Image (spheres, rainbow, N blue to C red):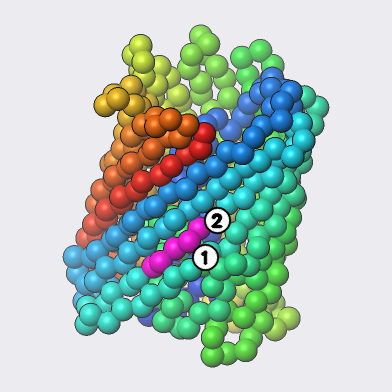
Amino acid sequence: MDPHDESSCFEAVAGRDPVGGGARLLAVLAAVLLAGWVGGPNDGAAQQTALPGFTGGIEAVYQNFSFDDEEEVGIRSVSLLTLPFAGRIGLAPGVRMELRGNVARGELIRPDESSIEISGLTDTELRMVADLMDGAASITAFALIPTGNSTLSVEEMGLAGVVGADLLPFRVSNWGSGGGFGAAVTLLHTVGEYGFGMSGGYTAAREFEPLADEPIQYRPGNQLHLRAAVDRTFNGASKGTLQVSWQRYDDDAVDGVNLFRSGDRIQGTVSYAFPAGATSNAVVYAGYLHRAEGQFLVDPETRSSEGLVLLGGGLRTAMLGGVLVPTADLRLLRRDDGVDQGVLGGVGATLELGAGDVTLLPSARVRLGNVTVAEGVESGVRGIELGFGVRMP
């Protein structure tokens, strides 16, 4: 079992690889590019001069994917209704507490009309962040609170594996675990038109019982991550950014015996943000994630290495009485063994509408692609995403 493996969704349905996990790369990437990962010291100084009040938001997102060749895939459709929530409150100048989590309901329908469902809270993340040196450095301590469904039946793990797949960008990637804790340090610096950033952190995972009918104790491997970024401003209006990250995992263990060594992950992303007219801004990006081959420690079986290409762009423009944010993206997943891979493209938009002290965020997106589920077996895949969020203030 490898909770860091987001790729083997169809093997999971067949009961061969029941655990899926990992971050939603595209969602993280979009947030990074639109919000800006590397900032100068003045950004942190502004945060330290005042004690911010509460900010937060909540959203409802419905996602559904269906397959053209449902008999070969073994799935007619899989859907996920997610209610993500997030909040932040200042505790002292330069010190804040952040909370984020999800309430979710997933359902997988097979060709024979039978279905599998999981619902409830996922794990909740609590963070304490302290800005230092006028915002040029920060220290973060975090805890993953095990509020989710960490113990599942074999059928429920099939659904969890599909939802955690790399190719399908569901909002939830992991239904629950034994929790964990860790810390990270971030350093920022500017020199002229250049900004530099570096962060490093360590996450320790706790063991839990993953299978409802088998009293085994499973502990995911602890994680070490390093990230670096450099950006350059052009003519005070455009910005190019390069980001590189590396993740390493310790051995997973079952009942205290090492079981699996997940392959290292390296990701690189380049982006360019620029004005697009008098009232609009745009961003384009390209990224690549490589996950090295994983190794089972009790036999010679290995988990195939994979590469995930991410391409896309977005626009922010005043329109329809608010701010319209259309986006487009492409995901191309390839594995050395040639299965559980494919391509998926999407287009959609979010509309930001001011309503008093809150911002309303309706959104819609469609996706089309193709997936290879076994040697010589392919199927088209279609997806739709509808969302509505409220951001405060």
Report the residue marked by disc 1: 121
The image shows residue 282 at horizontal and vertical percentages of 39, 24
Q: Which residues are magenta?
A: 101-106
**Amino acid at circle 2:** Gly
In terms of secondary structure, where does tag 1 sit? strand
Q: Depth check: 110 or 352 in front?
A: 352
In terms of secondary structure, where does tag 2 sit? strand
- Image position of 386 with respect to 287: above or below: below
Q: Depth check: 181 or 353 in front?
A: 353
**Membership of 102 in magenta stretch:** yes
Residue 38: image quadrant is top right
Residue 322 visible in the shown view = yes
Q: Residue at x 37, y 62 (%)?
A: 80
Residue 263: image quadrant is bottom right
Report the residue marked by disc 2: 101
**Membership of 269 in magenta stretch:** no
In the displayed structure image, the side of residue 211 where residue 158 appears, left or right: left
The image shows residue 273 at horizontal and vertical percentages of 45, 24
Query: Quick one: label 1, few (<14), some, or many (20+) residues within 10 Å?
Result: many
Query: Quick one: label 2, few (<14), some, or many (20+) residues within 10 Å?
Result: many
Instruction: Count the marks.
Output: 2
Badge 2 or badge 1: first in the primary sequence: 2
Q: Depth check: 122 or 16 in front?
A: 122
Given the current orientation, which residue lies at the most extreme left position?
Answer: 68
- Image position of 321 with respect to 209: above or below: above
